[in-house]
Amino acid sequence: MKAVWLLKNSFLWYAVTMMSLALVIGGLIALADSIRSHRGSQRTMLTGWIASVAFAVFMILMDCARYAYLAEPDPRYQPFQLTLFSLPWAFYAGIEAILAFLLILILRNGFLYRRSHLTQDAIRETVNLLPEGICISAPDGTVLLSNVQMDDLCRMLTGSALSDGALFRRWVEANGEKQNAGRLLRTPDGKAWRFSGEMLTESGKNDHLMTAEDMTEQYRITETLKEKNEHLQEIQRRMKAVSDLSGEIFVAREKANARAALHNQLGQVLLMGQHWLEHPESTDAEMVRMTTREMNRYLLREAEELSEDGAEASEPGADLLRMTLAMIKDIGAQAEIIGELPEDPARRTLLAYAIQECASNAVKHAEGDRITVFLEEDGNRLTVRIRNNGRIPESPIVESGGLLSLRQKTEAAGGRMLVESRPGFRLTLILP
């Protein structure tokens, strides 16, 4: 079998040489992996021995090639080197085969170990695949662990790599928007990230953990809700303004209706007076006189003063109350009063307005023809309860027109008014 140095320029020469180079590279890779994974001293020694033997074979082959291409023998080569050059090529091929077999076993064992055990590489790869950013740094800022996401965020926000965890943490606290227990930051790509931190205490060391969570969708929803809330508040302000304006318009309309009703009553009084002048024999002169006087007092705003001639001794409120009881008969209603009538003119006037409104509503809306007025006086407080014999209201009563005007008059006098629809219509006035 030929010596190895005689194989120059042949296929076997290149095959043996390249195989030795591949074993050197593979041995170094296996040695580095063994040292990094802390798999034990035996595995490290074995991989180191394989790498060393492969390197020695590669160096012998390189010297053999130099010796083979020399024109004359080089006296610098020692006898043991010439002996190594004279060994058959199968010897070196056998050594390489053994080294390759051992290297394959070691690599296969490492592959199987990584599939069944949690290694540092697996942990690092898993951390790098997380969508959240993670950074663990020592108290002096030395980065102990960080994933790709946190490195990218640091570059996008600060323009530099993540090399000092404490410095980056202070930058986040200074530039972030405070939100709950973290800081909210917007990146140039339009996303929103919330940074939060906590202390990790283990083996007497106080390391700092900082995490970054993608809050883009939540931030978008929050901003949308904020805009909608502002829009709703603007609508509420507009509705309040419209409500206030509507109230003013309604009061103005009620005043106009009151003036129209006053004009109608004035027309009726004038017609009554004309009828008395033309047919005195068929007209109640006392009723004409009383209604004319009350209308004049109302128009002249003297409803609470006695007449100048002093001929009438009764209070104006009593006259208005009697006139009201007489007028509701004209619309087909009757009033039954249970209790003593108040003596105060203001109370009598409010009672007259209440009887007139309840009688009108009983005939117009409830199809009734009778109202009952309960009067109860307790010290300085008068309670008035008015009911009718008409239909029960189908829905809650909405105050408008006369009822609303009566409430305004009652509250202006310092009283309270309550309108009920169940179990039947009932109007309650509490007058001071």
Image: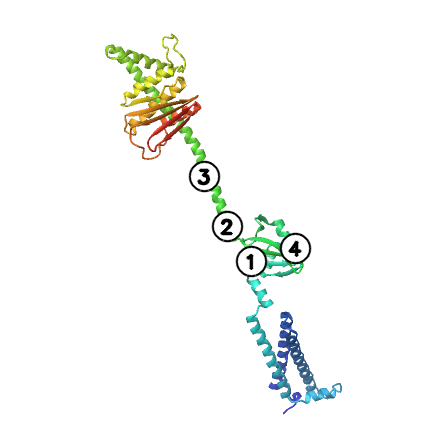
> In the rendered image, which residue does mark 2 sit on?
220
The reply to whether the C-beta atoms of the residues labelled 4 and 1 are less than 8 Å apart is no
The reply to whether the C-beta atoms of the residues labelled 2 and 3 are less than 8 Å apart is no
Q: Disc 2 residue type? A: Arg
Query: Which is nearer the N-term, disc 2 or disc 3?
Result: 2
Q: Secondary structure at mark 1?
A: loop
Q: Find residue 111 and report its image quarter.
A: bottom right
At horizontal 28% and vertical 15% (from top left) the residue drawn is 272
Q: CA distance from mark 4 to mark 3?
A: 48 Å
Q: Is residue 152 left or right of residue 331?
A: right
Query: Which is nearer the N-term, disc 2 or disc 4?
Result: 4
> In the rendered image, which residue does mark 1 sit on?
132
The x and y percentages for residue 410 are: 41, 24
Judge the density around disc 4: few (<14), some (14-19), many (≥20) Cα neighbours within 10 Å: some
> In the rendered image, which residue does mark 4 sit on?
166
Q: Find residue 411 and report its image quarter.
A: top left
The reply to whether the C-beta atoms of the residues labelled 2 and 1 are less than 8 Å apart is no
Judge the density around disc 3: few (<14), some (14-19), many (≥20) Cα neighbours within 10 Å: few
Q: Is residue 55 left or right of residue 366?
A: right
Q: Nearer the viewer, residue 179 or 256?
A: 179
The reply to whether the C-beta atoms of the residues labelled 4 and 3 are less than 8 Å apart is no
Q: Secondary structure at mark 3?
A: helix
Q: Disc 3 residue type? A: Ile
At horizontal 49% and vertical 42% (from top left) the residue drawn is 230
Q: Secondary structure at mark 2?
A: helix
Query: Which is nearer the N-term, disc 2 or disc 1?
Result: 1
Q: Is residue 119 left or right of residue 361?
A: right
> In the rendered image, which residue does mark 3 sit on?
235
Query: Which is nearer the N-term, disc 1 or disc 3?
Result: 1
Q: CA distance from mark 2 to mark 3?
A: 22 Å
Number of numbered discs overlaid on the protein picture: 4
Q: Disc 1 residue type? A: Glu
